Structure formats: structure tokens, C-alpha cells
Amino acid sequence: MIPLGDASRRTVSFPIVTAGLICVNALVFVLELIGGDDFVNAYSMVPADVVSGQHLYTVLTSMFMHAGWEHIIGNMVFLWAFGPEVEDAMSGARYLIFYVLGGLASSAAEIAIDPGSTIPSLGASGAIAAVMGAFVITYPRDQIKSVLMIGWFARVTLVPALVFIGVWFLMQLFSEVGTVAGVASDGVAYMAHIGGIVFGAATARLFEWDGGRASTGYSNE
């Protein structure tokens, strides 16, 4: 399933922080293309290095980097689908702090599961997972306009947020169990996703403000 956005409500104001985060991720990706492997290796997070107290800044920089076009496009589609309404619920400043903390929490989960790993880690997936965790707590009954793909067949349909994000979470959970059990991994940091969504769901209410919540209606496309 590919999320296109919230069909149940529209945002009160333009999601400037979400748009800004997408722009920053895009800019960093351009820098990756220009700088090549040297740039990627310099700013990706290596758990073993962080545990030993080296290159601590990579815990932050790695969450704005991506491994390729498919990686960044997929992440930004998910961020644009779920971010605007969460930004409305929290306000711009709180949402930005929440996003960064979600990314840090996802990195911490990844380090905790394999502190000796020397494999570079990068991507916004953990922070975006935190946004999804907040979304399912704040708007569990909303309908997510989604592209449902079965083989070569695709159709646009509405999926309840609780179902969409719940299925996504279970996929991450079972993929991580398989990886820990020794099944070949596809290179995705599933534990970072799990850590992010758990952080988002657990702390969402702490970041909301009274003037938040997007208005009921149809979202802008």
C-alpha cells in the first residue's frame, strides 16, 4: 500500500515544517550525489562508532540521508501523507522537536539491538515512523487514501489509519524477528522503524497543543 494522504480532514494551515523537512532531505540527497561515497560514509551512523563515543553527530545527520532514489521517494511520500495532520496537532515548533526526537529514538533502538554493528545506517524512516505512530494515536479513525497494489493490479482505495499503520507495524515487527533469527536481511533497519513508531505512539499526546487538530473535511490533493 502506498499512502496518498488523509481523506478525512484537511489541514488548518500549510504544513511548512513538513514541507521544509522534505526540502532538507532532498538537498542532502543532492549533496550525497555530488559527494559520493566519501560524503555518505562521513555522515552515516555506524552503531559501533557511536557506542565507542566516535562520530556522535551522525546520529542526527544520518536521519536526513538516503541510500537511493527509491529510498528517498518512498520516505518522502509517507512523510507528506502523514506529516501535515500531525504538524497541525502539535504546532510547527513542537512537531519539529518531536520529529528529531523520533529519529534519535529510532537510532537508539537500532544501536541497542546490535551495538557492535559496523554497517552504516542512514534514512529518515525512523523519524517518519514516529510521525505515523503519532498519527494513529491522534487520528485512528481517519481514512487514508491509498494505492493498493496486488501484482500488476493497482487501485485507489480508502484504508482506515489504524489498519494501514497497524499492518505496516506488523510487517516491521515480523521482519525484525526474522532478521534476529538469522533470516537473510534486505538491508532495511526494521528495529529503527519499530523504535520510531513506538516512540511516536507513546509521546504523541505530550506534544499536542489545544489549538491543534486538522479540521474535518477533505484533504487537499
Image (spheres, rainbow, N blue to C red):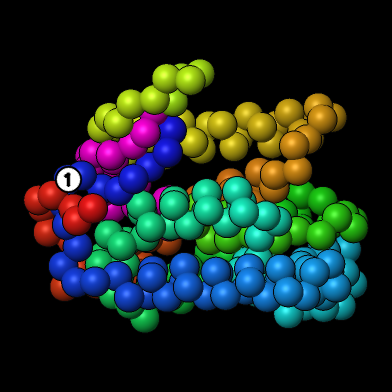
List the residue tagged with mark 1: 8
Find residue 120 and report its horizontal and vertical position in percent: 81, 60
Determine whether the residue tagged by mark 1 lies in a helix, strand or loop: loop
* Amino acid type, label 1: Ser
In this orientation, does residue 126 appear?
no
Name which residue lies at 58% across and 64% down.
Answer: 103
Find residue 39 and report its horizontal and vertical position in percent: 79, 74
Name which residue lies at 73% across and 28% down.
Answer: 178
Q: Nearer the viewer, residue 142 or 28?
A: 28
**In magenta stretch: residue 7:** no
Above or below, 121 against 22 in this view is above
Q: Nearer the viewer, residue 163 or 44?
A: 44
Neighbourhood count class around disc 1 (C-alpha, 10 Å): few under 14, some 14–19, many 20 upward: some
In this orientation, does residue 190 appear?
yes
Span of residues in magenta: 131-148
Describe residue 105's horizontal placement relative to residue 169 as left or right.
right
Name which residue lies at 36% across and 53% down.
Answer: 82
**In magenta stretch: residue 145:** yes
